[in-house]
Image (cartoon, rainbow, N blue to C red):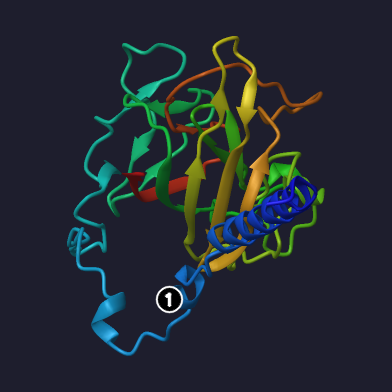
């Protein structure tokens, strides 16, 4: 064969070979259609496919006072064994127990607090303002519920009694104004239901997550997952000391406010 024809023939063959290889590569690397999304979007026709049976929630029953069976009863009207004086932890709570199963602040004896400490909680407290209406504003039926001993949910006779809005009943004292004033008349008992989640701190004591609180006053939502800025100070701005679990404290503000049916569920 003439050598002049060999070179172009070989070159043409190489070009054909390369073209074929590229086409094969294109064929082998062609994207494969992802059918996962199509499978996930397929309609569910079996109702049992979305049923979840485990874990099964624990059954909660109620006693004659409507206290949940998994609650810690802090005051049942019989004694103050769960409480201590904040002035002296070895002294029993010095407030008065009444014949109707309530307890009343004895002015000047000081605050009382639970012997047990709590973190996240659901707290139920019932209270009643003094039946003899005296004073105005902050001087009328004043007390307070301090979560972990630091964060006050205000107790105040706010029935037809104007005061600063972030200091009325159910205010996070001097921080958060309640969404409504749900205070019943003075002669009636008030009920607070409080859902509280404690703050979080890092190893250096810096706050990394704020405490939150939800409050229902006589069944009316008045604090809705409210962030607590820090300690509820009478004067000055909130502070944020690092802490763990703490007691529930009831305030002696000098007014004979009464309390009953206090229980807490640990969350």
The residue under the point 56% across, 53% down is: 214
The residue under the point 42% across, 86% down is: 43
Closer-to-camera residue (235/23): 23
Closer-to-camera residue (118/40): 40
Residue 136 visible? The answer is no
- Image-quadrant location for residue 133: bottom right
Closer-to-camera residue (130/15): 15
- Residue 36: x %, y % from top left: 46, 69
The residue under the point 68% across, 31% down is: 232
Q: Residue at label 1?
A: 39
Closer-to-camera residue (153/70): 70
Is 166 left, or right, of 62 in this rendering? Answer: right
Is 262 left, or right, of 142 in this rendering? Answer: left
User: Element type at marker 1?
Assistant: helix
Residue, far front:
1
Is 241 left, or right, of 111 in this rendering? Answer: right
Is 223 left, or right, of 79 in this rendering? Answer: right
Vertical position of residue 102 compared to residue 52: above or below: above
Vertical position of residue 45 compared to residue 58: above or below: below
Q: Quadrant of the C terminus?
A: top left
- Residue 259: x %, y % from top left: 42, 47
């Amino acid at each position: 064969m003439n050598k002049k024809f060999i070179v172009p023939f070989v070159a043409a063959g190489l070009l054909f070979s390369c073209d074929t290889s590229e086409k094969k590569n294109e064929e082998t690397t062609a994207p494969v259609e992802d059918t996962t999304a199509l499978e996930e979007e397929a309609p569910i026709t079996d109702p049992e496919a979305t049923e979840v049976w485990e874990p099964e929630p624990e059954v909660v029953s109620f006693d004659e006072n409507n206290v949940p069976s998994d609650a810690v009863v802090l005051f049942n009207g019989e004694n103050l064994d769960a409480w201590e004086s904040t002035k002296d932890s070895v002294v029993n709570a010095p407030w008065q127990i009444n014949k109707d199963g309530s307890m009343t602040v004895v002015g000047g004896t000081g605050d009382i607090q639970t012997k047990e400490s709590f973190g996240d909680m659901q707290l139920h407290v019932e209270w009643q303002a003094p039946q003899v209406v005296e004073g105005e504003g902050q001087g009328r039926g004043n007390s307070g519920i301090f979560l972990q001993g630091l964060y006050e949910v205000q107790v105040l006779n706010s029935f037809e009694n104007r005061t600063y809005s972030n200091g009325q009943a159910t205010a996070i004292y001097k921080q958060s104004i309640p969404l409504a004033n749900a205070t019943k008349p003075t002669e009636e008992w008030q009920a607070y239901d409080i859902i509280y989640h404690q703050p979080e701190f890092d190893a250096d004591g810096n706050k990394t997550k704020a405490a939150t609180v939800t409050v229902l006053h006589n069944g009316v939502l008045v604090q809705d997952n409210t962030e607590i800025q820090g300690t509820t100070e009478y004067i000055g701005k909130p502070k944020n000391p690092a802490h763990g679990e703490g007691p529930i404290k009831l305030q002696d503000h000098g007014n004979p406010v009464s309390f009953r049916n206090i229980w807490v569920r640990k969350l």
